[in-house]
Image: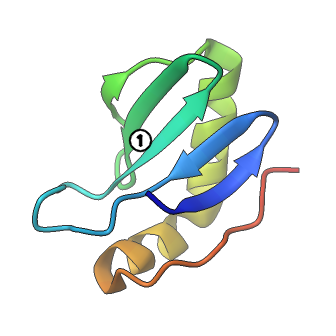
Amino acid sequence: MPVLSSFYDITITMYFRQVEHNPPHIHAKYGNDSVVIGVRDLKILEGNLPPRALLMVKEWMVIHRDKLLEMWETQKFEKIAPLD
């Protein structure tokens, strides 16, 4: 899975086989915890992160939602700026 971004020990990745992995979502890993979050609605599809890490991931997703959806549709990988 390509790494889209990394910040505060959180790694964000995305699969690029949309036929097999709908709806659009990202995977976030923090330590031993991981979560799958829908890009459009920010709903947790699977897993869990500590509250502060989850809040940062969702904030990053809101900032970059359009880019995430574009990458999901085109399946063209790009690095995305980390959360500052």
Residue under the image location 11 percent in, 67 percent down: 19
Residue 30 in percent (x, y) is at: 63, 26
Q: Nearer the viewer, residue 39 or 79?
A: 79
Tell me which corner region of the image, top left, top right, bottom left or bottom right, holds residue 46.
top left
**Number of other residues with Cα within 10 Å of mark 1, as a class: few under 14, some 14 to 19, many 20 or more:** some
Residue 18 in percent (x, y) is at: 20, 67
**SS of the residue at dot 1?**
loop
Which residue of the protein is positioned furthest toward the left in this rendering?
A: 19
Q: Nearer the viewer, residue 32 or 65?
A: 32
Residue 78 in percent (x, y) is at: 59, 78
Tell me which corner region of the image, top left, top right, bottom left or bottom right, holds residue 35.
top left
Task: Specify the quadrant that holds the N terminus.
Answer: bottom left
Q: Amino acid at mark 1?
A: Leu
Name the residue beneath numbered marker 1: 42
User: Taking 9 as reference, is 7 above or below it?
Assistant: below
Q: Is residue 19 left or right of residue 60?
A: left
Residue under the image location 57 percent in, 40 percent down: 58
Which residue of the protein is positioned furthest toward the front in this rendering?
A: 1
Q: Is residue 54 left or right of residue 52?
A: left
